[in-house]
Amino acid sequence: MRAARNVLAGLAVLVFAFYIAFVAMRGNTPAIPGDRSIASLEEIELGGVPQWVLIRGHDAHKPVILFLHGGPGMPAMYLAHDFQRAMERDFVMVHWDRRGAGKSFASGGELSVSQTVADAIELAELLQERFTVDRIYLVGHSWGSYLGLLVARERPDLFHAFIGTGQVAGSKEEVRSVRRLFAEAVEGIAPQQDLTEDDLFRLGGELYGETSLWPILSTGLRAPEYTFFDALNVGKGSSLVAKNMDYDVDISPHDGEVTAVDVPVFFLLGRNDYNTPSLLAADYLKRLKSPMKAELWFEKSAHFPFWEEPDAFHEALVWIDATVRRHD
């Protein structure tokens, strides 16, 4: 019996070692067939600090979308392989792991909102020059939606439109109130304290139909662009950036709001999102001044519509592009 246990333990160690070796060797993005395609994983300098960017599309002449992840240090690049393959047929998709996040965990440098806005603008200008376009699309998820509106407010000339999903909106007390009502509706009893992120996952307010973060984490572990060590750094980077981010601008999440931007604005909202409650985002859109605005709802999504309903999200992006171009 002991010998059998030893054999099983040895096999488990061997399998784990092979897995580590396999994942550690990754760190490249798969090629996309075609003469006009682009599939590039690059370390570039923004604000004098090295940061990683993933660029993928079947046709480099298609509209460019810069995706701003949330957190502020939780990357979306490691999910791209799972949700955006169809999007790559109609757009050039760009993911950027910001300072301290994901593949850019060891980048160092200043962690402040103003510097992050400056980095985003520098990247948008680089993409504008590289793809010889006048403007690109800016998508912001969660904390990235807060960042995106600051960027669009400062440099509207760079963007066709801003697209917010998991949109940050409302005051801290408004968010707490909506979350308490959600928890009471699900469990039949009012919570005695503020809901944590773990509570939101358990109740289905982060991922529709799921009760934990595991579906996202397991997807991230399969990302070809991430080595094993990159994957390990996701959690560490998220904590690092959240702890050290300096809110050195006039607005912080749930404390003040951008009141006007000179670009079209679209909110792509998960009906079941209680991380950044979508009802508050919809109310915010009514107040926000913009030359064009609309909200689109995803009935089987919570905080991650682009991952939970990728086909519908793709269709929404195509519709937005057609709508904006008709009004240009």
Image (cartoon, rainbow, N blue to C red):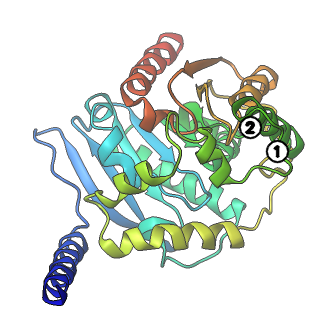
Q: Is residue 39 toward the left or the right of residue 265 in the image?
A: left
Tell which of 70 and 47 is nearer to you: 70
In the rendered image, residue 247, in percent from the top left (x then y), is placed at 78, 62
In the rendered image, residue 238, in percent from the top left (x then y), is placed at 57, 66
Look at the picture and state if 316 lies above or below 28: above
Question: How many numbered circles are shown?
Answer: 2
Look at the picture and state if 327 lies above or below 120: above
Tell which of 257 and 278 is nearer to you: 278
Q: First in sequence: mark 2 or mark 1? A: 2
* Residue situated furthest front in the rendering: 1
Q: Which residue is mark 1?
A: 191
Pointers 2 and 1 in contact (C-beta within 8 Å)? yes
Amino acid marked by disc 2: Ala
Task: Answer few, some or many: residues within 10 Å of disc 2's Cα (few below 14, many 20 plus, some between 14 and 19).
Answer: many
Under tag 1, what secondary structure? loop
Amino acid marked by disc 1: Pro
* Residue situated furthest top in the rendering: 326
> Residue at coordinates 23% horizontally, 76% vertically from top-left?
16
Q: Which residue is mark 2?
A: 183
Distance (Cα) linking label 2 and label 1? 7 Å
Q: Is residue 145 toward the left or the right of residue 91 in the image?
A: right
Q: Is residue 243 toward the left or the right of residue 216 in the image?
A: right
Under tag 2, what secondary structure? helix
> Residue at coordinates 39% horizontally, 47% vertically from top-left?
94
Can residue 100 be seen in this snapshot? no
* Residue situated furthest left in the rendering: 34
In the rendered image, residue 59, in percent from the top left (x then y), is placed at 23, 34
Specify the quadrant that holds the N terminus: bottom left
